[in-house]
Image (cartoon, rainbow, N blue to C red):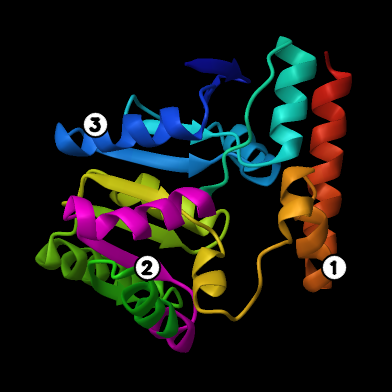
């Protein structure tokens, strides 16, 4: 269930298909890294000639990605948001006995996210670490994660830092599943609100983010240019 876009295999199933795949791979001790391939991330992956293996799953997180695939491949994809994967695993971690680790956001935000995960979802979060660290601290953080031996590591460092971290340390991390979750910790910590359901269903979550955080406008321009060029090239 994949469709190739500029050499990147995009997951072409629906949300339930994805979760079934992830749980099966966790159960089978098959390491997996989930990357939310929104247009911004796609642009980064393509521009850096990102090297990947079969352990990666790239999900179509963004209406722009789905639009590019529709125009270039004639394939209709179901948008799958990384934050939805995140919340689904929070809800199921207790029942499935999955240990989780949070990496990302500011110290006060990740602490609040940790507390909310336990209080509201009864999630099995075994540890957390803020995302404001220098490169010389990375090995220490990897050791901290490995010591706690979580099943799932959520990385919310923003693009491209989270993709670079996952690529650099995927093989050194003693975890079964790594999921890039962007700003999901901010939502869980209630620092920011997610877009209303009607905007999400219409593929306008990106617009809501720009309205709430105008600083995203510069990033949005690059994304729109990338989407337009990708469509016009076909």
Cα–Cα span, label 2 and label 3: 24 Å
List x then y, in percent, for residue 68.
Answer: 75, 25
Q: Nearer the viewer, mark 3 or mark 1?
A: 3
**Drawn side of residue 49 relative to residue 149, left or right:** right
Magenta residues? 83-111
Q: Quadrant of residue 71?
A: top right
Q: Position of residue 12 (x, y in %)?
A: 54, 21
Q: Nearer the viewer, mark 2 or mark 3?
A: 3
Q: Reading the chain from its start, which is encountered first: label 3 or label 1?
A: 3
Residue 106 among those drawn in magenta: yes
* Circle nearer the viewer, 1 or 2: 1
**On the image, numbered disc 3 is attached to which residue?**
24
Q: Earlier in the sequence, mark 1 or mark 2?
A: 2
| Cβ atoms at labels 1 and 2 below 8 Å apart | no
Q: Is any part of residue 229 visible from this angle?
A: yes
| Image coordinates for residue 211, horizontal then vertical, percent | 85, 68
Residue 179, placed above or below residue 188: above
Q: Disc 2 designates what residue?
A: 103
Residue at 30% x, 74% y: name it. 128
Q: Residues within 10 Å of mark 2 (few under 14, many from 20)?
A: many
Q: CA distance from mark 1 to mark 2?
A: 26 Å
Q: Residue furthest bottom?
A: 108
In the picture, residue 51 is in which quadrant? top left
- Image position of 185 (left or right of 198): left
Q: Secondary structure at mark 2?
A: strand
Query: Can you identify the residue that label 1 sits on?
Result: 211
Q: How many residues crowd mark 1 within 10 Å: few (<14), some (14–19), many (20+)?
A: few
């Amino acid at each position: 269930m994949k469709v190739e876009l500029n050499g990147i295999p995009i997951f072409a199933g629906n949300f339930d298909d994805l979760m079934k795949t992830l749980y099966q791979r966790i159960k089978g001790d098959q390491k997996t890294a989930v990357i939310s391939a929104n247009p911004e991330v796609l642009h980064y992956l393509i521009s850096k000639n990102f090297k990947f293996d079969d352990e990666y799953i790239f999900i179509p997180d963004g209406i722009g990605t789905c639009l590019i695939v529709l125009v270039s491949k004639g394939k209709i994809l179901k948008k799958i948001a990384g934050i939805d994967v995140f919340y689904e695993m929070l809800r199921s971690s207790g029942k499935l006995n999955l240990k989780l680790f949070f990496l990302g956001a500011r110290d006060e935000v990740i602490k609040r996210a940790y507390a909310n995960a336990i209080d509201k979802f009864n999630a099995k979060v075994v540890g957390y670490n803020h995302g404001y660290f220098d490169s010389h601290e990375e090995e220490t953080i990897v050791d901290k994660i490995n010591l706690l031996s979580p099943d799932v590591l959520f990385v919310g460092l923003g693009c491209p830092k989270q993709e670079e971290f996952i690529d650099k340390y995927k093989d050194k991390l003693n975890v079964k599943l790594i999921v890039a979750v962007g700003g999901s910790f901010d939502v869980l910590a209630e620092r920011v609100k997610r877009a209303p359901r009607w905007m999400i269903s219409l593929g306008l979550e990106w617009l809501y983010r720009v309205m709430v955080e105008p600083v995203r406008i510069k990033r949005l321009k690059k994304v729109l240019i990338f989407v337009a060029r990708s469509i016009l090239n076909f």
